[in-house]
Amino acid sequence: MAKVEIYTQPGCPYCQKALMLLQAKNADFQEISAPKGTPQREEAINRSGGKTTVPQIFIDGKAIGGCDDLMALNQSGELQKLLAV
């Protein structure tokens, strides 16, 4: 199974939506709390190539983007392929 990491912020509805999809897919993921101003948020920004929004999602170390990107991957059927690696 693929390694999934998701940087989130408390109270973020997009983070919750992305987490719910990953749970529905039975993905094994690591949630990293990354509120503004924390080292974890800086790490997410650096890893994502400068994107400052949350969630930031990585599958096997590759930045795939945020909630909308995750939903688009799911719609196209690509998410299941990425998770099955």
Image: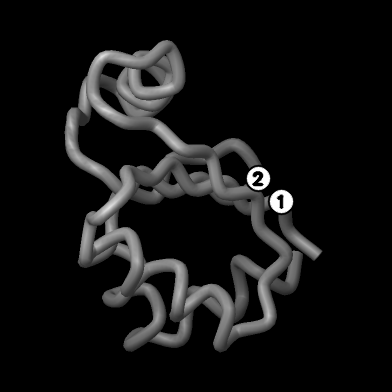
In which quarter of the view is residue 49 placed?
A: top left
Which quadrant of the rendered structure holds the N terminus?
bottom right
Left or right, 60 with reference to 55: right
Q: Quick one: 9 or 6, which is closer to the camera? A: 9
Residue 42 location (% of width, % of height): 35, 14
**Residue at the extreme right:** 1
In which quarter of the view is residue 77 placed?
A: bottom left
Mark 2, residue position: 60
**CA–CA distance between discs 1 and 2?**
5 Å
Q: Residue at x 32, y 59 (%)?
A: 15
Q: Quick one: 57 or 16, which is closer to the camera? A: 16
**Residue at the extreme front:** 11
Q: Coloring scheme of the render?
A: one colour
- Indicate which disc residue 3 carries: 1
- The secondary structure type at the circle numbered 2 is loop
Residue 35 location (% of width, % of height): 31, 31
